[in-house]
Amino acid sequence: GENVEQHPSTLSVQEGDSAVIKCTYSDSASNYFPWYKQELGKGPQLIIDIRSNVGEKKDQRIAVTLNKTAKHFSLHITETQPEDSAVYFCAASPNTGNQFYFGTGTSLTVIP
Amino acid sequence: GAVVSQHPSRVICKSGTSVKIECRSLDFQATTMFWYRQFPKKSLMLMATSNEGSKATYEQGVEKDKFLINHASLTLSTLTVTSAHPEDSSFYICSAGDRGSETQYFGPGTRLLVL
């Protein structure tokens, strides 16, 4: 089955700096890769996603890149703000309606 | 984005009682919903896949008789923790996706505390 690894597990950055979180996956059949932000005591919220036919996607300060050959994808947050502090999860999915395979999460702290 | 709700958001119960958690897709229909359990500072652990009109599919190690799942309609799935014990205390989260879409939207979670 699919195995998703995520690094780093914790990340601290100064406000205004960039943050990068990386994930790798093992199943070449995976073709959908969402990123979720989870604040304390709340459910994960989808922040951006990318499909395997696209190499990069950007939404304001957030971007995701995908390297299918190397089987890795990354989340980039620029101009970080304190409200970006949360736990971020990557996931991989092989097909529509199938389960997601989640990374282990990255706790991001943005220091004011 | 699509909205998924969960009820209750928090529940405290005595050991031995049963607790029902509801997961609703508010503005779309979901033939499949997923139930997760999350321990503090840990990732989401898939418990089962809830299929509308049929039996749920449970992950290895998850007791189907303890965690009863019912998906009676395209907008509602329920998870019942039967004969709850303190070790069942956890954060339970559901997710659902619109038919034909890969995207899964998560509910806000239910914090269960069994005394």
Image (cartoon, rainbow, N blue to C red):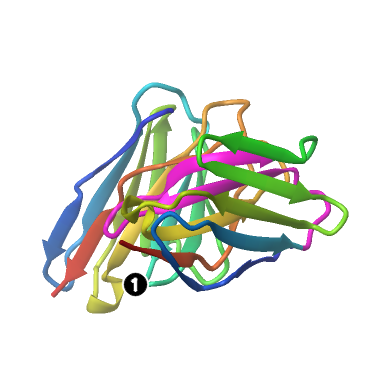
The quarter holding residue A87 reads: bottom left
* Residue B58 in sight in this render: no
Q: Looking at the picture, tell me which residue is in the foreground, A112 or A34.
A: A112
* Residue B83 in sight in this render: yes
Residue lying farthest to the right in this orientation = A69
Q: Position of residue B15 (x, y in %)?
A: 16, 73
Q: Position of residue A70 (x, y in %)?
A: 84, 59
Residue displayed at 46% across by 49% down? A79
Q: Looking at the picture, tell me which residue is in the foreground, B75 or B107.
A: B107
Q: Does residue B93 appear left or right of residue B44 in this picture?
A: left
Residue A31 falls within the magenta-colored stretch: yes
What kind of element bears circle 1? loop
Residue displayed at 19% across by 68% down? B113
Residue of label 1: B40
Residue displayed at 57% across by 68% down? B60
Q: Position of residue A106 (x, y in %)?
A: 49, 66
Residue B76 falls within the magenta-colored stretch: no
Q: Quadrant of the N terminus of chain A?
A: bottom right
The part of the chain drawn in magenta is A26-50
Residue displayed at 37% across by 71% down? B39
Q: Looking at the picture, tell me which residue is in the foreground, A96 or B63.
A: A96
Check the residue under mark 1 and report the chain it is in.
Answer: B
Q: Quadrant of the C terminus of chain A?
A: bottom left
Q: Position of residue B75 (x, y in %)?
A: 39, 28
Q: Does residue A69 appear left or right of residue A45 in this picture?
A: right
Q: Amino acid at mark 1?
A: Pro
